[in-house]
Each structure stands twice: as structure tokens, then as C-alpha cells.
Image (spheres, rainbow, N blue to C red):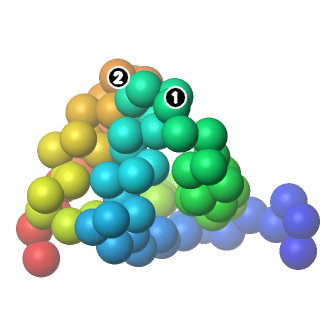
Amino acid sequence: VKGLEFPGACGVLTSGTAKRILDYIEDGQHPEIAEEARVLYVGASRAMQRLAIAVPQSQKDRLASLLGMTGTLTETIAI
């Protein structure tokens, strides 16, 4: 349902998807990745209080760094 929000939301990214989206966010190149990034954004924007994004260890520091630049409170949990 368009615009529906939830107390929490979760996104799970494969290694390749996470790398492509983070590359796109950092450099804005490769517009063909914009749709993948938009889908992640839409899912993330549904979270009212808590958002969990599962990414491979290889991309977790990049994601935390980008989120930190926005002033977003982040917590990294190794699983």
C-alpha cells in the first residue's frame, strides 16, 4: 500500500547489490543502478522507528560511513 509505514523495516542486500548501490550513492554514476537504489530507499522510508539493513561484512563499513555522514544514528551488529 502506497505510503504505508511500519514500526520497523528490514532490507537484505547481496554482496553485489550492496556494492552497486553504495558505488552509485558515492559517485552518482551508472544511472542503471538508480532503480535498485530507489527500491532500497522506498523500503527504508517505510520504517517509523527502526531500520535494519543486512549487508555482507565486505560492505558494512561503507554503509555505516555513508549513514554516519547524514547524522543517522547507526549500530553495527556482527552476525
Q: Is residue 22 left or right of residue 10?
A: left
The residue at which mark 1 appears reads as 28
Contact between labelled residues 1 and 2, with CB atoms less than 8 Å apart: no
User: Marks 2 and 1, Cα distance to the nearest angstrom?
Assistant: 16 Å
Residue 47 visible in the displayed image:
no
Q: Position of residue 61 (x, y in %)?
A: 16, 44
Q: Is residue 42 left or right of residue 25?
A: right
Q: Position of residue 3 (x, y in %)?
A: 85, 60
Residue 59 visible in the displayed image:
yes
Q: Position of residue 56 (x, y in %)?
A: 20, 67
The residue at which mark 2 appears reads as 69
Q: Residue at x 44, y 49 (%)?
A: 21
Specify the quadrant that holds the N terminus. bottom right
Select label 2 or label 1 by which is in front: 1
SS at circle 2: helix
Q: Is residue 71 left or right of residue 49?
A: left
Q: Residue at x 27, y 67 (%)?
A: 15
- Closer to the camera in the image, 42 or 4: 42
Label tally: 2
- Closer to the camera in the image, 37 or 11: 37
